[in-house]
Every structure is written in C-alpha cells, then in structure tokens.
C-alpha cells in the first residue's frame, strides 16, 4: 500500500484519526472498514481540495464521507422545513450510516423507512416533490435503482417539460451509493450514471471527497431540478478531511481542476479521481509527464468549457470511469472534445474504462480501470506518433 | 466494531419494541404436534400449524417413519453445517463479498423440496445455498463452498458467488440478487410448464421484505388470470434485513396477500407441517391454479455477514426460538423419543456430515481460481471481442 502525502501509512493515519478528542457535540471517532483498508490504496488527500473554499478560514471538523453527507442532510433538514429523508433502513441510520442521528433530531415524520420497493420510493418522492416538498430519497445501492428507472426517466425528468412549466419536481433529490467496493459483485458495484445522463431533465452529481460531498449535496438538494446524487461507497469511511462546519454549496455544472498540468488532460469523477491522481503522480515521477486532472463533479450537465479549455492547452485527453466502455459517459466527453478541439489534438482521445461485461465478482481486480491501466494509457497517448 | 453507548441504548429500545414480533412467535402459532407411534410409523397430528385463505387446509395428520426422519435430519443438518462452515470461512476472509445464511430456516427448503421432483422448477433469491444441496436439487457441498470462495470448481465456475447458484439438471434457477425479481420470472417458468404441457409446477421463493415488491403482484395477477401451475412461497423470517414485518407491511398476513389467490400459512419450524403444506400446494397448482404459501420461519444469524442480527431484535428472542422451536432439534427429538435412533446413531450421522463439510472446505480452499478468460466469456452466446482496456495495458501478466 502506498503511503499518503503526509508520509504516514494507512495505519498511522487511522491512529491519528482516532486520536481526535471528543468534545461536546462532536462526532465519535472515525473508523475505517477492513474492506477499504485492504483495497488498493485509499483516497488521496491532495485530490480532495475544494478551490471554492480556498479562502475559508472558519471552523472545520474532521469528517469522513458518510459523516459529511450526514452533515449536509442535517443542515438541509434544519433550514428547510419541507425537507424529508426516506428510503430503506434510513431510520436507524442507513446501511452506510449516512442518515445516522437524523430521525432522533428531526422526528419520525421527517426521517422514515419505506418498505422494500424502489419503484414505490421513486414515485412517492416524485409525488411529494410535485407539491413542493423537498424529498431526499435514498436508493440503498445504485444497482437497485432499475425498478425506479421508469419513474425517474419517464416521470421525474419530464414533469416540467410536459406540463409547459406548470408543474415540476425540482425539490427532488435521489441519493445512492455507487461503484466498486472490492467485493460487491454484480449487484453491489454498478455505476449507472450513463443511463441517467442520457435523460434530459435530470441532473447527475458525483462527489469525490467529504468537503466536496457536503457542498455538492446541499447544492443538489436546493437545485430546482431533480438530481441524482451518486456517492462513491468505497470511500464512505476511508475519505477523511477537515470539512467546514458552515452551510456552503458548491455550484452544480462546474468542474474542478484537481491538479494542473500541461501535457495531458485527465477527466474523471468520484472514486476515479483518486485513481487518476495516483496515475498522474506515477507519470510525473517515472516519465516526467505533467498531467492536468479535472473532476467533473456534475456529470449532467457537464462543464464543457473547463474541459475544452484544458484540452486546448494540453492537446491530449484521457477519460476514465468504472462503468463499461461502450456508451459510457467517456464516449460523450470524447465526442464533444474532438468536435470542439480537433485541430488542437496531438493524439487520439483515450478512454480507460471497465470492460464490456457485467461487473464481475472474482475478477474485479482485473476489471477495474486502476492506476496501472491509466498510467499505460497516459504513456501511450503522450508518446503517440503520427507517423 | 464496538457500538457506541447511544447505539446500544437505541438497540435495546428497538429490541423492546421487537417484543411484539416475538409475541407472534409464541402465539400458539408455534404449533405443537401430537405424536403417536403406530407400529413402525409415527403419526403426527398438527395443532394450529396452518391458517388458510380461500382454500382447504392441508392434512392435519402426517405419517412418517424412521428412514424419513433420518433423511430429513441428515439433509437439514448438512444444510446447517455447510452454512456454519461458510460463516467461519467468511470470518477467515476466505469468502469475500456478500453472504446470506439460511441457518434456522432449513425446514422450509427441506420440506418443500421433498415434495417436488427434478422436473419441477425452483427459483429463489440470494439465500440460496441450502436449496442447492437439497436431495431434489442434488448439488454438492463442495461445489457450493467452492463457489463461495470463487473457484473454477464452484457451481457457477466461481463467477457468480453466494447469490448466484444454479443447477440446470434440477431446474434450479438460482440465485437472484435483486429482491423480488425472481417472482415474475417464476411465474414465467410456470407459464412454460402449462404451455409445454409438462404437468410440472414452478416454486418461487421470496422473503417477507420482497413480498412488498410491486412486481410480485404483477406476477400473481398473471398467474391467476392464466391459471398457472405456480407456487409462491414467502419465507417469512419476521425481519426484512433489519426491519420487522410490523414496520414494513401494512398487511402482515402474507398468505392473504395474493388476495384472489388462495394461500396457506404454515409453521415452518416443523418440516412435516411444511411437507404437508407443500403437498397440498403442488396438488392445487397442478389441478387448479396458483397458490401462495407463507412459511413462518426464523433465521438465527443476521441478514448477511455484515449484520450482527441483534440491533433490531433481542438475544432472548433468538435464544428462545433456538431452544424451543429449532427445526433440526424437533426431528432429532422425534427420532429419540420414539426410539427410532439412539444418541450414538445421530452422533454417527453428525460425524459423517462433519467429514463431508470438512472435505468440502478443504476443496474450496485448494481449488484453482477461474482463468482470466472467464472474465469475458458468457457475455453473449457467441464469442465477441470485449471492448475496454486492452489486455496488454492490464495487470502485469494478465491474459498471457
């Protein structure tokens, strides 16, 4: 396992995290799960800096990803009396603890369990949003979102359009853990973002760290459009950061430059930002290649201008995601980039994605677009020879 | 992972409320059977084992004999020992991912499988290991455990894992991860039987949590409309993951949820009561149409390996069921009480089972993993080149 930038091993970071003193009102100690400790190296601290908060000098608290999401929901429920949180098992805190303490704080009318029925959950949420409430509906795993697909795509996405603006479900937010977790297999690892990015009327947001997550979730909840917020589940406990305690939002539709560079632009989101960051470090160290890394944050509508400006600067583009390659979001980014930057391109645009197979169980390590695969793709792209 | 004090207090409050669920367990529901020896046959008379909805009660009397008792004992004990071994292997990190154990519920699979043949069709959800090794299905403990450890010798070549076990020659359709998805598929299997005039039935299992999925009701409607030979089984272990039935279902009498479809509720901790209900259901499905069985059972462990199973119910409740209503102990008691077998005989069976399971564990530990080519086979019927990252860019040594 690689050491973090601070020079501490993962165990060292754990020990330091657990030494956080418990003050009144502060959360209990942070812990990581065995699964994430055993997975390939965890989140990279330097990849989670939020530029919009560069000048923030207020109070912060050490939170992991699920705590920061919890914090965002708490603020949302506090400030918006019409906000409610529901889903399967959220009353006791949820299977990933993202909803912990909310029922105690806001009451059982505002934080409640639904039976096991995703289609029902989605439709129920749409109905509430239609009359002006702010429902925050959880789909326990993104893999289970498909019974709700019709409601989300045919109802939620089209509400405003089909009524000519008379009705809308803008207050609606779906939250769902997505992505590879090391052992999830077919139905606990999927990345379904492409299906929803393909539906006009929906917004899709994916955070890549605790500070990002809180700001993006608050923005998503308050955005006057239905938003699907996919949370990288593998980082729920392992991504730890000093998060501002205030209420703050990160604008939707705006990408984040994680790392500046001049030789190649890399685009990703969620967990993949950390994978790409490590690949960038490898490329810098071993080949002297300077990589610019962009975190899209919002996948639909995605920040075309930031990516295009970057590609025009570097002349090379690499996009990486866990979802299968064919018709994944990388295809859309690739196509738009070549359309707008054709004369600037020095090499074909690279896509480092999951294979076109169902998400495998035992083969996950081969399937994942890890830093080694990305490093090779960076090398191939930068060393591309026209002749 | 220690729970904070607040979580523990919360758990105790929750557990007190769960007392309601355990009241259900005790409410004469837990049937008692009157046992009378008639020569070499044991006559069982069930009191309060069944409740019915729009149909006749299954036979309140069942006959069995020494061999049958021994066979059921052996089958259920094998299921339990296999699940316990899987539990241990998971804790040793030989099994990763998701694992949902059937411990406590053995009588449901054992009893219902015994009324079906290999030509009947069975489909269930992810708590499927026991169904694989029933006498009907004929899977081996070796292939189940090897599948759990992800080896090529597993029943799905290591590609499916715990939730995806299948056996084509026994028409066992698995093994489904998405809750509720298997029920309409089961109705489809029944339609095929009717269409092809095989005279066979399909049995679709689901849990009490899954019973609230919308697609089930679509399946019930079609099954009833077209009078399909379908048996729908709700394995009601009183908790959908961590949510008790009281808090998830407006109608807790699952056997009535088919509405226009007849239903039988059975105390599924007695394998013979389950068998009789199964017999009645098969007859009904073959002659009249679909029927629903609600098998009231109990699981001792949590929902899966990441659930301790004690935050939403009290340890007393679990202990009480284990001590007074355990399905394997019930059969063992009948063997001993009526001198069909001695403690030594039963110990011999247990020993035999231990050997089988130990060998299977060793097999699961030492079998080879599937070759990398399995990653991209069986995606389509034909071999297509799999787009993605070229093998040369992949993990060093991969694909070569």
Image (cartoon, rainbow, N blue to C red):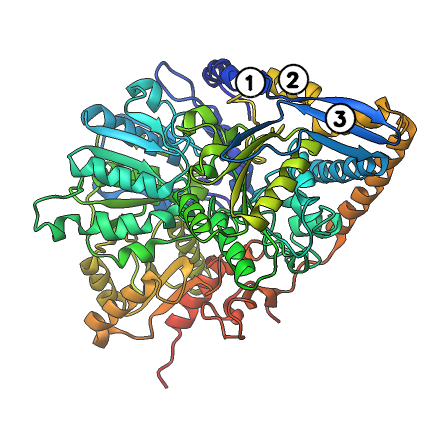
Q: Is residue B321 visible?
A: yes
> Counting residues from the N terminus, which is met first, the one under dot 3 or under dot 2?
2
- Pinpoint residue A145: horizontal percent, then vertical percent: 37, 47
Viewer-nearest residue: A291 or B129: B129
- Pinpoint residue B39: horizontal percent, then vertical percent: 88, 29
Disc 2 marks which residue? B320
Q: Is residue B128 left or right of residue A31?
A: right
Which quarter of the figure has residue B331?
top right
Q: Is residue B92 visible?
A: no
* Residue drawn at 47 percent across, 15 percent down: B17
Could you classify mark 2 by the number of other residues whose Cα lies within 10 Å: few (under 14), some (14-19), or many (20 or more)? some
Subunit that carries the residue with mark 3: B
Could you classify mark 3 by the number of other residues whose Cα lies within 10 Å: few (under 14), some (14-19), or many (20 or more)? some
Answer yes or no: do the residues labelled 2 and 1 have beta carbons within 8 Å? yes
Q: Is residue B380 left or right of residue A291?
A: right
* Residue drawn at 59 percent across, 50 percent down: B286
Could you classify mark 1 by the number of other residues whose Cα lies within 10 Å: few (under 14), some (14-19), or many (20 or more)? some
Query: Is label 3 in a helix, a strand or a loop?
Result: helix
Query: Is label 1 in a helix, a strand or a loop?
Result: helix
Question: What whole-number distance in Å separates the C-alpha atoms at marks 2 and 1?
Answer: 9 Å
Disc 3 marks which residue? B329
* Residue drawn at 53 percent across, 72 percent down: B381
């Amino acid at each position: 396992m690689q050491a973090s930038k601070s020079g501490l091993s993962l165990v060292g970071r754990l020990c330091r995290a657990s030494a956080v003193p418990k003050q009144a009102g502060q959360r209990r100690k942070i812990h990581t799960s065995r699964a994430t400790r055993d997975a390939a190296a965890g989140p990279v601290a330097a990849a989670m800096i939020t530029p919009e908060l560069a000048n923030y000098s207020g109070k912060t608290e050490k939170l992991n990803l699920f705590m920061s999401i919890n914090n965002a929901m708490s603020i949302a429920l506090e400030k918006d009396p019409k906000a409610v949180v529901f889903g399967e098992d959220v009353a006791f805190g949820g299977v990933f603890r993202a909803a912990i303490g909310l029922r105690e704080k806001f009451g059982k009318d505002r934080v409640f369990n639904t039976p096991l029925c995703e289609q029902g959950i989605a439709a129920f949420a749409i109905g509430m949003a239609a009359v002006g409430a702010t429902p925050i509906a959880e789909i326990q795993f993104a893999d289970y979102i498909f019974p709700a697909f019709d409601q989300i795509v045919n109802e939620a996405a089209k509400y405003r359009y089909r009524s000519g603006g008379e009705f809308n479900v803008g207050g609606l937010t779906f939250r769902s853990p997505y992505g590879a977790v090391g052992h999830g297999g077919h139905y606990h690892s999927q990345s379904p973002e492409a299906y929803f990015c393909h539906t006009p009327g929906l917004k899709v947001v994916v955070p890549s760290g605790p500070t990002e997550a809180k700001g993006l979730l608050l923005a998503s909840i308050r955005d006057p459009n239905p938003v699907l917020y996919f949370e990288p589940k593998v980082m729920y406990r392992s991504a730890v950061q000093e998060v501002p305690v205030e209420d703050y939002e990160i604008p939707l539709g705006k990408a984040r430059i994680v790392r500046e560079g001049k030789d190649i632009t890399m685009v990703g989101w969620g967990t993949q930002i950390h994978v790409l960051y490590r690949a960038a470090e490898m490329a810098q160290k071993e080949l002297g290649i300077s990589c610019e890394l962009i975190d899209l944050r919002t996948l639909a509508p995605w920040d075309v201008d930031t990516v295009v400006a970057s590609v025009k600067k570097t002349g090379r583009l690499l996009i990486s995601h866990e979802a299968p390659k064919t018709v994944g979001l990388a295809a859309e980014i690739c196509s738009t980039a070549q359309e707008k930057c054709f004369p600037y391109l020095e090499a074909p645009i690279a896509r480092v994605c999951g294979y076109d197979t169902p998400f495998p169980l035992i083969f996950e390590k081969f399937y994942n677009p890890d830093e080694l695969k990305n490093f090779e793709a960076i090398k191939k792209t930068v060393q591309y020879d026209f002749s | 992972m220690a729970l904070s004090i607040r979580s523990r207090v919360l758990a105790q409050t929750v557990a007190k409320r769960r007392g309601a669920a355990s009241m259900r367990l005790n409410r004469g529901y837990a049937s008692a059977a009157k046992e009378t020896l008639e020569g070499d046959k044991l006559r069982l008379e069930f009191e309060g084992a069944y409740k019915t909805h729009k149909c006749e009660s299954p036979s309140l009397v069942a006959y069995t004999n020494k061999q049958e008792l021994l066979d059921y004992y052996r089958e259920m004990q094998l299921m339990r020992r296999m699940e316990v071994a899987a539990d241990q292997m998971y804790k040793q990190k030989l099994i990763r991912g998701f694992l949902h154990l059937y411990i406590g519920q053995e009588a449901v699979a054992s009893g219902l499988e015994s009324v079906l043949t290999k030509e009947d069709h069975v489909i269930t959800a992810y708590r499927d290991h026991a169904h694989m090794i029933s006498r009907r299905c004929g899977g081996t403990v070796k292939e189940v455990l090897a599948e759990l450890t992800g080896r090529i010798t597993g029943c799905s070549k290591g590609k499916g894992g715990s939730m995806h076990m299948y056996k084509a020659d026994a028409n066992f359709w698995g093994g489904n991860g998405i809750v509720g998805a298997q029920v309409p598929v089961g109705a489809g299997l029944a339609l095929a039987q009717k269409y092809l005039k095989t005279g066979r039935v399909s049995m679709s299992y689901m849990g009490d949590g899954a019973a609230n999925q919308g697609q089930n009701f679509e399946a019930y409607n079609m099954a009833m409309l077209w009078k399909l030979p379908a048996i729908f089984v709700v394995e009601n272990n009183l908790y959908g993951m961590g949510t008790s039935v009281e808090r998830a279902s407006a109608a807790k009498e699952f056997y009535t949820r088919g509405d226009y479809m007849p239903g039988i509720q059975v105390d599924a901790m007695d394998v013979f009561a389950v068998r009789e209900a199964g017999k009645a259901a098969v007859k009904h499905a073959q002659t009249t149409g679909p029927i629903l069985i609600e098998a009231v059972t109990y699981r001792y462990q949590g929902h899966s390996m990441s659930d301790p199973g004690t935050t939403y119910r009290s340890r007393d409740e679990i202990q009480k069921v284990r001590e007074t209503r355990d399905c394997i102990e019930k059969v063992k008691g009948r063997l001993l009480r009526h001198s069909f077998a001695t403690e030594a005989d039963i110990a011999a069976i247990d020993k035999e089972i231990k050997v089988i399971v130990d060998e299977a564990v060793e097999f699961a530990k030492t079998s080879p993993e599937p070759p990398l080519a399995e990653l991209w086979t069986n995606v389509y019927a034909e071999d297509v080149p799999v787009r993605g990252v070229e093998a040369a860019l992949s993990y060093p040594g991969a694909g070569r």
